Image: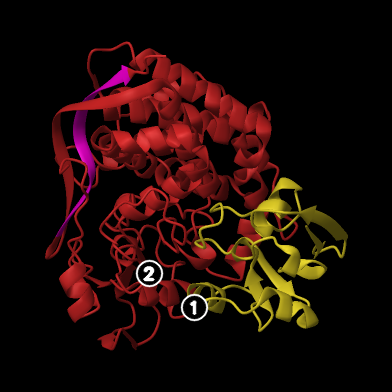
Amino acid sequence: MQKSKIPDPFEKSRIEMGIGKMDDQNDPVTMLLRHKDVRKTAHNYKTFQSAAQPGRIVIPSEVNIRKTRQIPFELDPPVHGLYRKVLEPWFKRPLEEDYSNKLKAQINSLVDEIITKEKFEVIEAFALVLQSRALTLLLNTSFEEATTWISWGTHVFRSEDTNLDADKANILYDYIDKQIDKAIENPSNDLYSVLLATKVDGVKLTKEQVKGVMVLTFAGGRDTVINAITNAIAYLSEHQESLERFRSEPEIINNAVEEMIRYFSPLTQMGRVVTEDTYVCEHAVKADTRVSLCWASANRDAAVFQNANELIVDRKINPHVGFGFSHHNCLGATHARLIMRILLKVLAEKVESIDLFEYKENVEELGDFKRKVGYDYLNARFNASKK
Amino acid sequence: MAKVTFITNNNEAIVLEGTTGSVMALAVAHNVKGIDGDCGGVCSCATCHVHVKPEDMVKTGQASEIEMDMLELADNSNEYSRLCCRLELSDDLDGVVLTVAK
């Protein structure tokens, strides 16, 4: 029962100091580790801003590889709210029955294909494919586009040997530029066209702003969704009893998804830029430095979660911050939740058990902390239900 | 059986009846605008925030500590705020009036 475990490297610092420190390309970060501090700081957009230089609130910082401001993510209220309000209805479409049925059909078909294999690599052959195909629904674009996205590999900005890969980032930016130009020439019902026709405060979004929303949609939901899916497969391989419970008590699947998001915390942290000299958790921080909201640490805070280091599939009260918190909570969360809910349901229906083979953990180096966030590769087999 | 009235942001009154489950689930099942219940009722998202009619607070009771912590940082929160995923349908709730928070 060790392969699927995601240890909490922050516990000692969270209890003793409340903060951690890490460097990131000579722009150091004070990491907030306690649930209460993370939520309060996320809420205080005046002192801890998102509308800094594009790329700076991301850790590792993307200032050297990105000039486009991600929207609405890199804006602050009240402007942020104007954009969020017009985008939200589109990103809530996963609540519609038709969307859900299409996603279920996609996941059913992928599991049917994978279940015939003696062995498969979970990230490349399953999680990336599932995530990419599902994204065609969120963008309301053709299913075939997923083939292009799959060909980019698992990371939009990162490659195996470097944390930030400008060449890879440019593939995405060039692709989005082309898609926006296509949508200008031939408007359709896809997200590009809808954004091009969208007005905020009576003014149409510019091409650069459309690009900002699209970059966020591609980048924000890629590694995170892939990590969530892959970690779920690893967990279920060691917890066949949970698959059985999802079969006999499907009503707990929602709780299980929220608990997996808490336990896996697919996005470790997100930064903010400090606008004035102030204190976080009784530690001084200077203006124009960075703090981070460490979701992964907050989600293991024993002051809030009983048995915080255990994944309890039917946890009832779960005020996790796995999708962030406050104004900037994850715009794609409705889509991500639906993916996970359907995935668990389909696996429970079709898969009796899961075998794991060779794997390599993906461990983030965060100053003094080393955090497992998922896997570089993970080989598995789905054993079909006997019925 | 409880009869629950939701007042939406455009001042529409929607009266629903239910016997089991949470008030949030009842609202979501009937597409009450402004009650999304994104997290499905585990108290992590605050998308089921309502204001209880002051005289009905005796029926709903006060928020728990975890719910209070959530509400403290929610928009437009006040002393009558509740997350309706935390309100279980029962006879005690009959007649309650809830205004969907903006």
Q: What residue would you read off at disc 2?
A: A272
Which range of residues does the magenta coloring cover? A370-383
Viewer-proximal residue, A275 or A225? A225
Location of residue B100 by image quarter: bottom right
Q: Residues within 10 Å of mark 1 (few under 14, many from 20)?
A: few
What chain does mark 2 sit on? A
Residue at 46% of width from left, 34% of height from top?
Answer: A248
Where residue B101 appears, as percent x and y from the top left, is 71, 69
The residue shown at (37%, 71%) is A304
Q: Is residue B100 visible?
A: no
Q: Colour of chain B?
A: yellow
Looking at the rendered structure, whether the residues under marks 1 and 2 are on a common chain is answered as no
Q: Which mark is residue B8?
A: none
Q: Position of residue A38 (x, y in %)?
A: 37, 72
Instruction: Give the vertical position of B30 relative to A386 (above or below).
Output: below
The stretch drawn in magenta includes residue A378: yes
Considering only vertical position in the picture, is A387 above or below A281? above
Q: Is residue A99 left or right of residue B58?
A: left
Q: Which residue is mark 1?
A: B65
Q: Where in the figure is residue A298, as x and y percent of width and height? A: 33, 67
Is A88 a magenta residue? no
Tell me the SS state at disc 2.
strand
